[in-house]
Amino acid sequence: MRQTNFLSGQPARPGGLPDVSWYNAAGKPVDWEQGDPSLVCLLAALPRVDHDAPPNHHVLLICHSGIEPRDFTLPPIARTIRWRTFIDTAATSPADVYPDLDGPPSPGNGVVRVESRSLVCFVAPDTW
């Protein structure tokens, strides 16, 4: 997740994902004026410069500070990617962190239930 440049919202290469994208719980671009307690952030993997370095992975963060559980619809661009759970702060150990990128896959219907005041982080293990 370390970057050497500021995120711009633009693809690092033609036809790629923007380096960062922000969405609401409905999977639409976020409206910063709404004051919604939920936010989705898609961080695109940057191309590796050093091929001896570990691979880069797309990351999808779903943050929910509301007091009730909420369903999040993945944005259309995120539904084309195969995601695995990396962190779920509402889950009990050992089902809360999957450091080997072998966590449960994201739901096939594109809807993720997130518990109140929690974060779910998905990683795309097949990225570069």
Image (cartoon, rainbow, N blue to C red):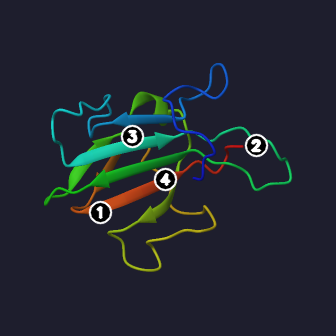
Of pointers 1 and 3, the one earlier in the residue sequence: 3
Q: Which-is-in-front pick, marks 3 and 2?
A: 2
Which residue corresponds to mark 2?
A: 48
Q: Is residue 87 above or below residue 46?
A: below
Considering the numbered disc 2 on the image, is that residue within a helix, a strand or a loop? loop
Q: What is the spatial separation of the Cα atoms under label 1 and label 2, in whole angstroms?
A: 31 Å
Q: Which-is-in-front pick, marks 3 and 4?
A: 4
Considering the numbered disc 1 on the image, is that residue within a helix, a strand or a loop? strand
Q: Amino acid at mark 1?
A: Ser
Which residue corresponds to mark 1?
A: 118
Q: What is the spatial separation of the Cα atoms under label 3 and label 4, in whole angstroms?
A: 13 Å
Would you say the residues marked 1 and 3 are in contact, meaning their CB atoms lie under 8 Å apart?
no
Residue drawn at the location 66% of the way across and 39% of the way down: 46
Of pointers 1 and 2, the one earlier in the residue sequence: 2
Considering the numbered disc 4 on the image, is that residue within a helix, a strand or a loop? strand
Q: Position of residue 112 (x, y in %)?
A: 34, 49
Mark 1 crowd level (few <14, some 14–19, many ≥20, 10 Å Cα): some
Q: Position of residue 38 (x, y in %)?
A: 24, 47
Q: Position of residue 32 (x, y in %)?
A: 23, 34
Q: Position of residue 85 (x, y in %)?
A: 49, 58
Q: Amino acid at mark 4?
A: Phe
Q: Amino acid at mark 2?
A: Arg
Residue farthest toward the front in the current orientation of the protein? 5
Q: Quadrant of residue 13?
A: top right
Which residue corresponds to mark 4?
A: 122
Which residue corresponds to mark 3?
A: 110
